Structure formats: structure tokens, C-alpha cells
Amino acid sequence: MIESLVYDGTGVESVEDLAAARTADGTTWVHVEDASDAEIDAVADAFDLHALAIEDVRNNVRAKSEEFSAYTFALVKTARLTRGETTFEEEIDDEPVGLFIGDDWLVTVATGSADPVARVQESVRRGDERLLERGPDFTAYRLLDVLVDSYFEVLEHLEGQIEAIEDEVVESPDADLLSDINSVRRELLSFRKVVWPVRETLAVLARGDVRATRADTQKYYRDVYDHLVQLVDLLETYRDLVVGTRDIYLNALSQSTNEVMKVLTVVATIFIPLTFVAGVYGMNFADSAYNMPELTWEFGYPAVMLGMAGVAALMVFYFRRQSYL
Amino acid sequence: MIESLVYDGTGVESVEDLAAARTADGTTWVHVEDASDAEIDAVADAFDLHALAIEDVRNNVRAKSEEFSAYTFALVKTARLTRGETTFEEEIDDEPVGLFIGDDWLVTVATGSADPVARVQESVRRGDERLLERGPDFTAYRLLDVLVDSYFEVLEHLEGQIEAIEDEVVESPDADLLSDINSVRRELLSFRKVVWPVRETLAVLARGDVRATRADTQKYYRDVYDHLVQLVDLLETYRDLVVGTRDIYLNALSQSTNEVMKVLTVVATIFIPLTFVAGVYGMNFADSAYNMPELTWEFGYPAVMLGMAGVAALMVFYFRRQSYL
Amino acid sequence: MIESLVYDGTGVESVEDLAAARTADGTTWVHVEDASDAEIDAVADAFDLHALAIEDVRNNVRAKSEEFSAYTFALVKTARLTRGETTFEEEIDDEPVGLFIGDDWLVTVATGSADPVARVQESVRRGDERLLERGPDFTAYRLLDVLVDSYFEVLEHLEGQIEAIEDEVVESPDADLLSDINSVRRELLSFRKVVWPVRETLAVLARGDVRATRADTQKYYRDVYDHLVQLVDLLETYRDLVVGTRDIYLNALSQSTNEVMKVLTVVATIFIPLTFVAGVYGMNFADSAYNMPELTWEFGYPAVMLGMAGVAALMVFYFRRQSYL
Amino acid sequence: MIESLVYDGTGVESVEDLAAARTADGTTWVHVEDASDAEIDAVADAFDLHALAIEDVRNNVRAKSEEFSAYTFALVKTARLTRGETTFEEEIDDEPVGLFIGDDWLVTVATGSADPVARVQESVRRGDERLLERGPDFTAYRLLDVLVDSYFEVLEHLEGQIEAIEDEVVESPDADLLSDINSVRRELLSFRKVVWPVRETLAVLARGDVRATRADTQKYYRDVYDHLVQLVDLLETYRDLVVGTRDIYLNALSQSTNEVMKVLTVVATIFIPLTFVAGVYGMNFADSAYNMPELTWEFGYPAVMLGMAGVAALMVFYFRRQSYL
Amino acid sequence: MIESLVYDGTGVESVEDLAAARTADGTTWVHVEDASDAEIDAVADAFDLHALAIEDVRNNVRAKSEEFSAYTFALVKTARLTRGETTFEEEIDDEPVGLFIGDDWLVTVATGSADPVARVQESVRRGDERLLERGPDFTAYRLLDVLVDSYFEVLEHLEGQIEAIEDEVVESPDADLLSDINSVRRELLSFRKVVWPVRETLAVLARGDVRATRADTQKYYRDVYDHLVQLVDLLETYRDLVVGTRDIYLNALSQSTNEVMKVLTVVATIFIPLTFVAGVYGMNFADSAYNMPELTWEFGYPAVMLGMAGVAALMVFYFRRQSYL
Ligand SMILES: [Mg+2]
Ligand SMILES: [Mg+2]
Ligand SMILES: [Mg+2]
Ligand SMILES: [Mg+2]
Ligand SMILES: [Mg+2]
Ligand SMILES: [Mg+2]
Ligand SMILES: [Mg+2]
Ligand SMILES: [Mg+2]
Ligand SMILES: [Mg+2]
Ligand SMILES: [Mg+2]
Ligand SMILES: [Mg+2]
Ligand SMILES: [Mg+2]
Ligand SMILES: [Mg+2]
Ligand SMILES: [Mg+2]
Ligand SMILES: [Mg+2]
Ligand SMILES: [Mg+2]
Ligand SMILES: [Mg+2]
Ligand SMILES: [Mg+2]
Ligand SMILES: [Mg+2]
Ligand SMILES: [Mg+2]
Ligand SMILES: [Mg+2]
Ligand SMILES: [Mg+2]
Ligand SMILES: [Mg+2]
Ligand SMILES: [Mg+2]
Ligand SMILES: [Mg+2]
Ligand SMILES: [Mg+2]
Ligand SMILES: [Mg+2]
Ligand SMILES: [Mg+2]
Ligand SMILES: [Mg+2]
Ligand SMILES: [Mg+2]
Ligand SMILES: [Mg+2]
């Protein structure tokens, strides 16, 4: 679906014919949403867009920017969290948005839907003054600004997941927690993979040595770039938090094994020797002066029981001192 | 709350009207504390401050500096340790302080309270000669210097925590120590996240290619920068110390499991065979020349007991040699 | 086997004689496949190729590019997955392809077979317009483009292996899984070792300060370079995924040991004390008022059994609370 | 204590008056040892040393160099190994030495004692020709050279500690070894923290774009710098060795737990079934054709014993094959 | 031992007198092997070699290059594998070779023996044309080329060790394998420490901004540099392989402990309850209707045995399902 707007300080109008739109006075913004091949070809034709750039948008390659003689090309990505079955159905779903920023025109191409674009179109139609007056590079800036804001929404979702994991690791660290931890690590990694090249792309635009950025717009690109730097910073921090959580979990497991071993050791080492003693007095030796005379003593049994209790008490005392109990 | 001071070598005075303050002879310093939107707008209006810079202060974005035509903008952070409930209520609380350094004026904007600013204001009022004479960039330097000193106070607190952990890991390594260790690691990480961009910001100011730093002030900015480099160095070192502590703790746990296993093994392997022997002599085989004649020997019982003692002695000897005992 | 083509906008022809081919009008492309020493010498002689460059192709050294006075030399690699017996029969099999890009000629030398070359030769023969018209550097670009596409085929195979491992680690984590994991890690590492220098080589070509890249071809080299950057990005991500899988596997093992210990501990700590009690009542003390009067009570046996059941119940309750059961 | 020397090719003399010393013909070297505040102020006054540089020496900040209009300032550190009680009484004790290198004078300030300085003073007094003739920057070089040699003495001590640990990990890996390992890691880290900034400082001096280094002295600074690079290289290597030692130690612990478990398992699994059998034949079932007729067989007992021996032999065989024995 | 050769396109001759050799027509190459102090002094004197460079060779410092007014100095290392007793008798034995490359002379100084030098001398004597004609920098290149080839021989030896470890970890992972693994890691590290600075040194020579490299020789230095880059790449890869081997070994140990625990758990949990039952029927309760009437039943014994078999069968079934068996 192609939508083309022409606007300047005096107002906004829709111009169907692409050739007319391109040469119209004021800023021309042509946006192609859910772009079909025919639509892309039509726009590329009308604005002389380079085949390589068009292909990059179609193939959704890594975000990038490239300077052409009549325009600056920037490829950025929208990001949305969609949990899939396996790893390679990417948990972070990214869609390409290609920006072609000319002298007095802007072409944007999205092969899917691109919510941030819709929001900026809305602002133009509502007659946002700065958008109308400041030319195509300022419109591009607004698009990028809204896009980066949408990244922060993804980030907030990831924050929620990390908090949930941090709560769970304290309250009930069970067997599948590590797999959850790994899943978040993967999402952070996957998100970083989307954001990092966009950051590089904006660094180029913010440096101001491309046609797209006039002196007074450069500060705005720089501002978006700063937000992206902050985002990447936070991603790094979150990754560290997640690794810390994993350490706590693995430790809880070791601690549990240690506790289990202590219980077994205490019970077994107390009762095994006592059982041996009981076994001894259960032996069937024939009567003889040397064969267990205790068996015939009047207080033989209580004496043995007392002895056993003494041994058990000593062991409990020992285990207390070792803090096994 | 807006407070505006005008000063030069001859003295200090308060000037209420912002327009008058800006054009007054000498250095003008306007500070906005706990800044309300209206106050920020008033100051931005009086000194022509750029909307993007104002927004950066309001949104407390990452520390940064930016050159504008009439002034240099630098955004820095105060840092305070406040332990929260969950991770995302940042343990290191940072508040933005925006500095706008003009030719003969300085505007500082803090959306919260900023203790370091108060201290420098106090020095100005007390008539510190160098502050009065050296212009707005020197006043800005003093502010940054006091700010970085306050970072070192936070660092000292973290040092205390690390020492406490190091003591505990030696004396009583219990189950929640790892969580304490992780908490300090997080604070170090969080502090680094605040300090690192401030360091970058000061690197720019110290390089001297911005309007804010005159030749004779540059060395001062460089000095503050050096302190920040030292701070970051220490943070790295502390992080290494904390990781080392974690290793010692985890090892103590493994060592404990190993000890527990040895106790169990020694006791069980000594008494289980003996209990078997006792069990054998407790069997109820009918009398026959081949069925346990020992039972009827005169010294049968002492012989068996001696045999058992011999087996036990051999095992103790073996465990000694294996250093299980 | 030497194959030499001469072509321009009007058509393609085969020219046997190398000297004639070099000076013919249009673009000359000489390709040596499964190159014998004699063939290489013949081509090197006809096109004055430097001995060092020829040696680099023969020895299959690291991918590289070098500028010579009459041509640009670039050494790249084909990559194919062939699993060998031991580590040093490289799992990723790479073969050298040397490109010598002159003003109106291109020489390519492969000591093995190079499928990507065959595909581009086919395109030339079929009369691909852009190939015929745009000169030797564009032909070289197409070769590199097809080559990098073949890298992505290898990558897809590795993706399949990682998915298989991720499935297995969840369903049946057995003893040799770690060795599979390590094997994939090694392949990723080995592939990265091939791709990384090719990436560097293309970075040089894309920068456009070598003879090989005319202004209008440079964007094409840049495009191939971007694909390689994406490939390396994916390799990094996959390596992270594999490490994550390893963590899950090792944890499953610890978890299993923990479970096994719990089973042993529960059974042993319940029955060992009970066995002790049974042993006590099996002792052969002579009748006396103090020697186990319980043995003669009418309800002695049921009482003891009840007592044992009580102890067992208490222990089960305790283990439930500890969640050992 | 202030000591001031004036020297050139013809000889050395002591000049008490600082002002006279500064303007005297030849090279002036003023050294302040165990510098008191008054002494530092006197020297700073006589040679117009900048307050910031003086403060850096007093506060013992990170090593650094700074260019002033009349001299080059370099702050370096002496290093000595002193083991303290807790972490923050640094195990590597470093003291600041400030160098101010003017056109024909050198001022050195040490707030503690600085042995390397004394050694160079001695050389000057003994009339070392090159020192007398080559000016203040050569004297500064000699000071730095002796200083770096003293670093290598510290390094040799650390080598000794690492060798001791490597011996101990093989011969008697006990519980506190990890704490020793960690302690050495900390010393290496702490030493690196001292040396690294000194390395940076010398890199600046060796680059030769500061006043301090004349063309013919530059090579000498470069030489000291090279030694520091080698030192840092060795520190990295030692750190790797220490980490390797830790791995061996942790493995020895796991191995020991594994061995202990095998002993327990072998003894318990052999005797527990046998004890069960003995227990069975100890049961008190009344005579009946179906109740343990074995008990009345003539060869019942030997048959049972043989059976038990057979079971034990089978188990030993099994454990042999599993290499538990 | 000093050996001096003078050569050009017309032939080679030995010239004893160093001064005469220096000024002779053609290229002069003076090599000092197993250099004594007197020999080094003689050569340094004849060719005006700087004292600092001479000292660097004597002290075998890190590989480096330095530009002097009349020559380029490069210090490189031969490498040989010699396994010592302890860590600090370096397993990789490196000897210094100093190269001083003048306009028409080359001086090489080795404090030990340097096999690569001998091989190049041999080529000169045999009249290798390119060596005779291309001047001292080409001779130096050949030396470096042969030297780097000898590094690859060391690398092949290390490959053999890694393969041996990889075989052993699969076939018989025993206690000292980790120490072997660590030993190879140390050798790789130690080798890297030798090679890395040589790589840096060759990077400088290959950049061509030193006197030593004429335009036509530069490509040759670049070629040697490329080989070193490949070598370092392989070292990194091998280090990764070794770390992977360590992981497999440590996992084998954990797996073994897990297996041992399973055996113990299965045997103990089957027989401990059965032994308890046998113990119960061995108790000596007096006859009474409530005291173990089973003992007097005709089928009491077979019933109990069946019951026990049933319990054992259930447990085996349970352990099968848990895959302990
Ligand atoms: Mg970052
Ligand atoms: Mg950061
Ligand atoms: Mg970080
Ligand atoms: Mg961290
Ligand atoms: Mg960690
Ligand atoms: Mg970091
Ligand atoms: Mg640092
Ligand atoms: Mg550092
Ligand atoms: Mg560090
Ligand atoms: Mg460390
Ligand atoms: Mg560590
Ligand atoms: Mg990457
Ligand atoms: Mg990346
Ligand atoms: Mg890597
Ligand atoms: Mg990363
Ligand atoms: Mg990554
Ligand atoms: Mg990761
Ligand atoms: Mg990990
Ligand atoms: Mg470090
Ligand atoms: Mg190094
Ligand atoms: Mg290093
Ligand atoms: Mg290293
Ligand atoms: Mg290493
Ligand atoms: Mg490790
Ligand atoms: Mg390294
Ligand atoms: Mg490498
Ligand atoms: Mg590499
Ligand atoms: Mg690598
Ligand atoms: Mg790896
Ligand atoms: Mg390691
Ligand atoms: Mg690994």
C-alpha cells in the first residue's frame, strides 16, 4: 500500500501520482507499507532508487546506511517480542524499514507493517508544525525517534522477565529455571543483534557527513543515537544480572546436594555402628566363659543400651561442632 | 527553586531578574534546584537553551556533552547509595545535573537536590577568590570536582561492603553469602554505569576543543578526568576481588561436601563389613560338623572379636594413608 | 584446466592463446581450475603475476589482498563442511581462490574445484548483460557474491546441528552430548577462522582505495562486505547459543546427581534406624528383669512395630517438608 | 629533606639556595625526600610548579604526565611488596615520585622515601659522565630506568610465590591453597594497577612530543617503555598460570570426592547384599518343610558361605571392569 | 664467532677485516654467532651500532624494532621447545637475534646459535641470485622468512600434543590429564608471548616507513607478516580446542561420580529395606498371639521371601524408569 503526502508550512495534501509528488513544492513523503514487489518497483522507478538498496530492504539484511548521489539510504528495523517454538524462529521479530532521504523528499519502504511510521504519518496529518516546516530529514528523525522509543518498550518487557526470574531463584529454584534464564539471555542477545547495527547506522547519520543531515537536524540524530547508546548499555547490564542469577541458581543446587549428604551422613554414621553392636549381641555363640558373658549379666542389656546412647550422644555432639546439624 | 548569583573579583550579589542577571557585568551563575517545569522553561527562555538539551536533563539520559553555538552543554550525575527492594529500583541512585557554560554565564539545572552544587554556591558566597575571578568554566570545574569527590564517598562505602564479605567468607560461609556477593557485584556494575559516561563527558571537556574550556582551565578539567579514570580503575579491581571471593566461597562448599562424604565413607566402610560378620554368626543353622563350628569353640567369641578389631584397624590404617582421617 | 573468455556488450568468445586473450578488446577472464603447476606458471607468465601472490595461492595462506602496480590481488576461500576423524583434518574444508583484477582483465586461480566460479562462468556464457558490460571488477564482485552465498549454505547446516543439539539437551541429555556440543563449537570456530580474513579482505576492496574498485563497483563490494558482517554476527550468536546449551546440559547432570542422592538419603535414613531397632530385639540377652522385658509382653511386638511406623512416618513428613520427596 | 645538586661536564656541587641553584650554569637537580608541606611549598615556589601537579603528588593519584609551559610533569610510583591484614591495606605498597623536567633543571618530589632516587644521586656524585653531560631529561631517564628495574625485583618475588603454589598444588592440595592462589592473583592485579599507568606515562614521554624528551634522549625513554611492556606481558602470563593452578586444584578436589565415593560404593554394595542374606538365615521361623530347610542341611552353612563369596567375587569383577578398583 | 660475507651479482667473498668489509662494494653481511662480549663490541664499533640496541640483544628483551639514523634495528627470536622441570624454566626456549639493516650492509647478532641464519648463509654461499642482487634488506627478509618457517615446526609439535590429549580424553581420562592439558595451554601461551612481539615488529617493517624496506622489498616483509598473522590465528584456535578438551574431561569426571552414586543408590535402596524385614523376623519376641504369628505359619518363610522379591522387583522397575539402570 503506497501513501504519499506533500507538505510545507502551509498544509498537507495527498498526491496520488508519484512523479507529480516528487516534483511538488514542499516536502514529499512516500511510504510503502506491506510492500509488494510491484509497489516497490514503482517507487524505486519514480525516485531512481538503487537496486542494491532495494534488495537490502527486501532481504532484511543487517541495518546499514549508504550514501547515494541523490539521496542517503538507511536501513533500520522494528523490533517486537514473539516467543517461538525453537531457537531459529527468532524470539525478537524484526522487520526492515528502508529510508531514502532526498533533498526535498523522503521515501520509506516497509515489507511488513511498521507501527512507528503510522504514528509519524498521523502527526503530519494533524499538522505538527515542526514536521511540516523542517524538511525530509527532520521527518526521518521523528521516525527514528519513535522507533527507538518502541525499542524501550521491548526492553521493559525483558526487565519484567528478569525480575520474575530473580524472584523465582530466591523462592523456588527448580529444574527448569536455568532454561528460563537461558531463554532470557537469548532474547537479550537477539535484541542486541538487532539494535547494535541500528546504533552504528545512527552514528553515521549523527556524524553529519552524509547528505541526509543538515546542520540543524544533526543534533536531533545525535539525540536518537544517545538513546540507543543508553539502550545498549542497559542490555549489557541486564546480561550481567542474568548471569548473576544463574550463579545463584547453580549455587542453590550445590547447597542442596551438600545438605542432602549431611542428612544421610548424620543418620548413617550414628546408626550403623549401633546396628553393629546389636548384631554382635545377636550372635549365637555357645555358652562358655569367654563367649559374651554380658548376655547373662543381670544389667547386661541396660548397660549395652546406655553404652549405645553414649556413642550416639558423642556423635551428635561431634556433628554439632562440625555444624552438620 | 531558582538562585542566581553575579560575581567578579570585587564581590558577589544576588540578582532576581534573569534577563538582568544574564547581561550583568562579571560571571552570572543561575542554579535551578528541584527544578519545576515552569522554572526550567523560564531559565531556558532567558538563556536560549536548546529544547533537546533541556529534555535530556528532564529525562535523566546518559551523561553526555554537546556543543551549542552560544554555550557548551554537559549532563552529569550525582550518585547516592540507596538499597531498594528489587533490582530495577537501582541501588545506585543517580540524579541529573545539567551544566550550560556560556561566555560569561553558567546555568545549572538539577531536577532533584544536588548537594555538590550547594557546596560550591557556599564557596562563591564566602568569596573564594579563584571562583570569583576565573569565570564560568572555572566554576563549572569546581562543581565537577566536588561531584567526583562525592563519587569517592560512594566507593568507600562499597569498599566497606567488600571487606565485610571477605571477612565473612573466611569465618562463616553460609548459604546467603553468594547473594550478598552478587548484590555488591550489582552495585559495582550499577555505579560503573553511572560513572563511565561521566568519564567520557569529562574527556571531551578536558580535550579542550569545546567552547567551555579556556586554555588555563583545561588542566583543571583534565585533573578531574584523571580522578575519574582512577575511580574506574578501582571499580575494575573491586570487581575482580568480588569474583575472587565468590570462588573462595564456592570452593568452601565443595570442600565441605568432600569432608561430609569422607566421614560417611569412613564410618560406613568400617562398620558395614563388621555388621556382616556379626550377621553371619547370628544365623540359625542346625548343628552339624560343617555349620559354623566356631560357635561352639571355647574361644570362638574372643577370636571373632579380635578378627573384627583387626579388620577395623586395617581400614583405619588405610584411611589414614589416604588422608581421609 | 585453463578456460579463457573475452566479452563485452556485443558478445562472448573463447580465446585459447593467453597473450592474445590479454590484449583482446573487451574484458578478458582467464580461470584456472584444479590448477597444475605448469598451468599456473603459464598464466603467471602471460599476465606478469608476482611470485609471492602465486605462492600465497599455492600454499593456501590466510585470505588477504595486496595491491600490485598492474593489478589488485585478492585471495579468498571456498568453504565446505566435511567431518573428519581427528581435529586437524579440519572439519571446515577451505580451498583457495586467487583473484588478480587488472584494468581490462581478470585472472582467477583455484588449486581445487571452485563451484562458485563455474556458476559465474555460466552466467557470462548465457550473456548476462551487466557482466558483459561492466568490466573485470564487476565480474570479480559477482564471484565474491556467489562465494558468500555459499557460506550461508554452510551456516544453515550449522544451524541444523545446533537445533538438533538443543532438542537433544531437553529430551535425552546423555554422556556424549558434550562432545557433540564441542564439535559444533569447533566447527563454528573453524568457520569463523575462514570467514574472518575474507571479511577483512572485502573491507579493503570496499573502501575503494585499491585499483580493483571503480566508483560504480564500490557499492557492490560494500554490499558483499555487509553480508559477511552479518554472517560473522550470526556466528557469534550461534557460539553463544552453543555455550548456553552446554550450561543446560551440565546443569541437568548436577540435577541428576542431586536427585540420586535424595533417593539414597531418603531410603537409607528411614530404614537404617529401623533396622537398628530390629537388631536390638534380636539380641540374645538371658532372661532378667532388666533385659528387654518387652520381649515377653503380650503386645510387645505390635508396640514395637507401631513405634517403627511412627518413626518412619515422622521421617517421611520431614523429607516432604524439605521437598526431598 | 631537600638536596640540590648542580652539575655539568666539569663537576658536581651542592647549592643550598634554591633560587641560586635554579639559575646556576649546568644541570640543576633538586630532590625532596620524605617531603614535608613546607619543603614542597618552598620548591614549588622557587621553580613555579603548578598547584594541580603538586596536589597530584601529595594525593598519590594514578601515574600521569602533563605538559606545562616551562616544564614537563610526570608522576610515577615506587612499588614494594608488603602483605597487610585486609585487602584495602594494599599488598603492593606504592609511593609517588613527581618529576618536573625543565630546560636545564629537574625537580623530583617524593612524599616517602624513594630508593631509586638515592641510587641515581649516588651516580651523579660519583661523577657518571653521561649523567653530568646530557642534561636533566637524561637524569630523569636514569631515574625511571632504575625504578623499572626495581619493579622487576617485585616481579621476581611474585614468581617465587607462583612456583611455591605450583609445587604445593601437586604435592599437598589442601583447603587453604585456593586462598593463597587468590592472594597471589590479587597481588598480580594490584601490581598491574600500579604499573599500567606508569606504562602509559612512559609511552607519552617516549613519543617525544613533550618538552622533556630531546631527540637523542627519546630512544632512552623508549627503552624504558619497552621494559615496562615486557613487564606487563609477564604479569598477564603469570595471571594465566595462576588461573591454571586454580583449575588443577579444583579438579584435585573433585577427583578426591569421586575417589571417596568409589570406596564407599564398592564396600557398601558388596557387603549390604551379603548382610541381607545373613539376616535372612537369622530369622526365627518355626520348623516346617517350607521354612528355610537349608538351615538343617549338613552342608547348608558352607553352601551359603560359598554363595556369598561368589556374589562378592562377581561384584569385585564388575567393579574392576568399571575401574572403580 | 664472526663471519663476514661481501656479495653482489658477480659473486661472494669472505672479508676478515670489518672496516674493509663495511666499505667494500656490494652487500656486506656480518653475522656474530654465540656472540662473546668482545665480538659484539668489535662489530658495534665497526658499524657504529647504538649501545641501547646492543643491550637489548644481550638482555634478550621483547622483540622490537627501532629506527636509527644510519640503520634499522630489529630484534627477533628463535623458538625451540624444551620441556623443563618447573614453570619458570620456560618450556619454549627463545634466543635473541638482532638485525641491523644499513644501506648496503647487514649485521646480525645472536647470543646463542641461530639455525635459520646458518641456512641463509648457506644460500648466499651457494650463490642464490636474488640474495646476491637485491641488497641487505632482501637478505634480512630471507632470514625472517626462514625464522617464521621454524615457528611453524614448533606449532606442528604442539598440534601433535593436542591430538594426543584429544585421543586420551576420549579413551582413558585419568587424574593427570588435566595437568597435561594445562601444560599444553602453558606452552601455547608461552609461544604466543614469543611470537606476538615478533608479529608487531614485522608489522612495522611491512608498513614500509622505515629505512630497512625499499619499495620492492616491502611486499616480502608483508608476506612474512601475513604468515605470522596466520600463526597467531592458529594459536588462538588451538587454545580454544584445549579449553574444549578440558571441559570434556571435567564432564567425564562429573559423569563418573554420577554413575558411581547411581550404583550405590540402587544397591543400597534395594537391600536396606529387605535387610530391615529380615531383622524384624530375627527378633526374639516370646510366643503370644500378637507377636509375629507369621513365624509359625507353614508358608510363613516363602511368603516373606516372595514379599521381599516383590519389593525388590518394584524398586528395579522404578530405577529402570528413572534410567538409573
Ligand atoms: Mg556498552
Ligand atoms: Mg558503558
Ligand atoms: Mg558491563
Ligand atoms: Mg559483572
Ligand atoms: Mg560471574
Ligand atoms: Mg565491563
Ligand atoms: Mg580501567
Ligand atoms: Mg587500568
Ligand atoms: Mg583490572
Ligand atoms: Mg583477575
Ligand atoms: Mg576467576
Ligand atoms: Mg560481530
Ligand atoms: Mg554485533
Ligand atoms: Mg571471538
Ligand atoms: Mg557480545
Ligand atoms: Mg553478540
Ligand atoms: Mg551471551
Ligand atoms: Mg554463560
Ligand atoms: Mg585486567
Ligand atoms: Mg602481548
Ligand atoms: Mg599485554
Ligand atoms: Mg597473553
Ligand atoms: Mg590462557
Ligand atoms: Mg575456569
Ligand atoms: Mg590472550
Ligand atoms: Mg587472531
Ligand atoms: Mg582471526
Ligand atoms: Mg578465536
Ligand atoms: Mg570458542
Ligand atoms: Mg581457562
Ligand atoms: Mg567454553
Image (tube, coloured by chain):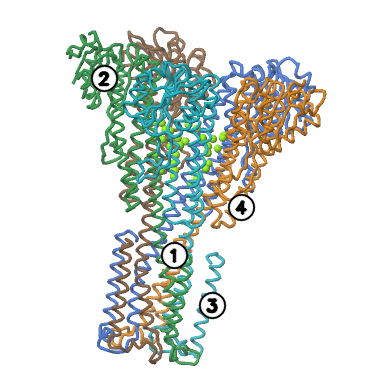
Chain colours: A green, B cyan, C brown, D orange, E blue
| Residue visible at 64% across and 47% down in the picture | D160
Q: Is residue D132 left or right of residue C112?
A: right
Subunit ID for the residue under disc 4: D
Residue A246, horizontal then vertical, whole percent: 38, 47
Instruction: Give the secondary structure at mark 1.
Output: loop
Disc 3 within 8 angstroms of ligand 24 (CB)? no
- Mark 3 highlights which residue? B310
Position of residue B183 relative to residue B194, above or below, is: below
User: In this orientation, which residue lies closer to the viewer: C206 or D115?
Assistant: D115
What type is the residue that disc 3 sits on?
Gly
The image quadrant of residue A85 is top left
Disc 2 to disc 4, C-alpha distance: 68 Å
Dot 4 falls on a residue whose secondary structure is: helix
Residue E258 visible in image: yes
Q: Which residue is mark 4?
A: D167
Q: Are marks 3 and 1 on the same chain?
A: no
Q: Label 4 sits on what residue type? A: Asp
What x and y, as percent, mark residue E190? 58, 39
For the residue labelled by badge 3, is the local secondary structure a helix, a strand or a loop?
Answer: helix
For discs 3 and 2, the disc positioned in front in the rendered view: 2
* Residue name at image x 37 percent, y 83 percent: C282
Tag in front: 2 or 1: 1
Q: Which residue is mark 1?
A: A324
Pick whichever, A288 or C128, lies toward us. Answer: A288
Tag 3, which chain? B
Between tags 3 and 1, which lies in front?
1
Label 1, residues with CA under 10 Å away: few <14, some 14-19, many ≥20 = some
Q: Nearer the viewer, mark 2 or mark 4?
A: 2
Q: Secondary structure at mark 2?
A: strand
Whole-number angstrom distance, CA of label 3 to CA of label 1: 30 Å
